[in-house]
Image: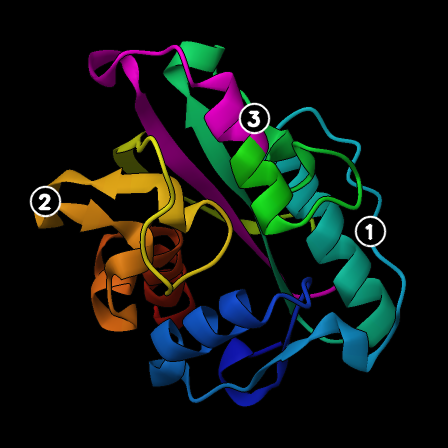
């Protein structure tokens, strides 16, 4: 099954992710579409690691679509919180939490943490599966080091971007344009690895 001549399903309906993934995988001349084109259901994310959850999501997307699928599981690890929220980043403030809810919970948890101790990183595991029973999924990992600001800054991006300080550019991730963010980000790094592997 040649990945270069097919539509690929993304196991997400996040418009920000779909936009980023289509931008970076453009050289494959693929159309990456959201899983909502096939189902309103979501994969059960009960793994204990980013890798487990990404594989579960990719397998589910292959199953419901009959097409190759990409899934990512990503989140933010904050050292002062012993790596939390980690795999629970999207639901840190509860199962139906908004981005703003999660940000507010993180900032509240960090309110007494000094500037020197606010180190954090985004992690992304990106999985590509050719079909539901693919025994050798392609697994790529990207990491983006930074720190947590004391208040949100910037209007671009999504998720925890407004509170993730990017030292190289002296701004938050939400103040970067999409091209610069893709060059630096955890998801951009994982996707470029994936592009390389699928182009080989």
Residue wearing tag 1: 43
Asked whether the beta carbons under mark 2 and mark 1 sit within 8 Å of each other, the answer is no
From the viewer's side, name the closer residue of 171 and 52: 171
Say which of 104 and 80 sits in front: 104
Residue 83: numbered disc: none
Q: Nearer the viewer, mark 2 or mark 1?
A: 2
The residue to which callout 3 is attached is 85
- Mark 3 vs mark 1: which is more N-terminal? 1
The residue that label 2 is drawn on is 168
| Left or right relative to 32: residue 29 | left
Task: Indicate the quadrant containing the N terminus: top left, top right, bottom left or bottom right.
Answer: bottom right
- Distance between the Cα atoms at labels 2 and 3? 24 Å
**What secondary structure is marked by label 3?**
loop
Residue 110 at x, y percent in the picture? 43, 18
Compare residues 140 and 171 and report the one nearer the observer: 171
Instruction: Using the numbered discs, state the Cα–Cα distance from disc 3 to disc 1 in whole angstroms.
Output: 20 Å
Cα distance between the residues tagged 2 and 1: 36 Å
In percent of the image, x 55 and y 35: which residue is there?
104
Q: Quadrant of the C terminus?
A: bottom left
Up/down of 86 relative to 62, above or below:
above
User: Is residue 115 magenta-colored?
Assistant: yes
Q: Secondary structure at mark 1?
A: loop
What's the magenta region?
Answer: 105-133
Q: Is residue 46 above or below residue 191?
A: above
**From the viewer's perspective, is 63 left or right of 88?**
right
- Residue sitting at 54 percent across and 77 percent down? 3
185 above or below 110? below
Q: Is mark 2 in CB contact (under 8 Å) with mark 3?
A: no
């Amino acid at each position: 099954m040649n990945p270069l001549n097919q539509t690929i399903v993304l196991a997400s309906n996040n418009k920000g992710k779909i936009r980023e993934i289509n931008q970076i995988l453009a050289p494959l001349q693929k159309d990456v579409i959201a899983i909502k084109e096939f189902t309103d259901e979501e994969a059960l994310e009960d793994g204990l690691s980013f890798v487990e959850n990404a594989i579960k999501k990719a397998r589910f997307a292959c199953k419901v679509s009959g097409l190759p699928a990409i899934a990512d599981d990503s989140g933010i690890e904050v050292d002062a919180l012993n790596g939390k929220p980690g795999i629970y980043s999207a639901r840190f403030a509860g199962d139906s939490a908004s981005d703003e809810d999660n940000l507010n919970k993180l900032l509240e948890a960090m309110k007494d943490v000094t500037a020197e101790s606010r180190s954090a990183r985004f992690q992304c595991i990106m999985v590509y599966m050719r079909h539901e029973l693919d025994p050798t999924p392609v697994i790529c990992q990207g990491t983006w080091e930074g720190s947590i600001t004391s208040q949100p800054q910037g209007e671009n991006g999504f998720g925890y971007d407004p509170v993730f300080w990017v030292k190289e550019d002296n701004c938050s991730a939400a103040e970067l344009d999409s091209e610069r963010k893709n060059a630096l980000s955890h998801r951009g790094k994982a996707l470029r690895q994936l592009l390389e592997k699928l182009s080989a």
